[in-house]
Amino acid sequence: MKKILKILLVLLIIYLVAAAVFWSIGNHELRTLIEEGVLDSEYTREELSQLCNEGEVDIFWGCITGGVW
């Protein structure tokens, strides 16, 4: 039983680290778009969704972490 709990704990830690990395990458993409003037600093989810659906800007992780996909 202790072995299973240790495995679950390790898997949880791996999941949390991966989620943090993906979230960080997505936020970096969004900050870059704001700095370039493509996206307003007070963007809405609809504006982000429009950018993600148009496909003119490469923001894959930003679309995921922004809650669009």
Image (spheres, grey):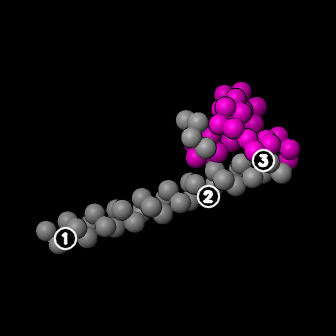
Q: Residue at x 82, y 40 (%)?
A: 38
Q: What residue type is labelled 3?
A: Ser
Res 3 label: 1
Q: Is mark 3 on a helix, strand or loop?
A: loop
- Residue 53 is inside the magenta segment: yes
Which circle, 2 or 1, is nearer the viewer? Answer: 2
Q: Choose the circle earlier in sequence order: 2 or 3.
A: 2
* Residue 58 horizontal side relative to residue 34, left or right: left
The residue wearing badge 2 is: 24
Local SS, label 2: helix
Spatial separation of the CA atoms under disc 2 and disc 1: 32 Å
Q: Residue 41 — which label? A: 3
Q: Which of marks 1 and 3 is nearer the N terminus?
A: 1
**What residue is at 56 percent from the left and 59 percent from the top?**
21
Q: Give the range drawn in magenta.
A: 36-65
- Look at the picture and state if 44 lies above or below 50: below
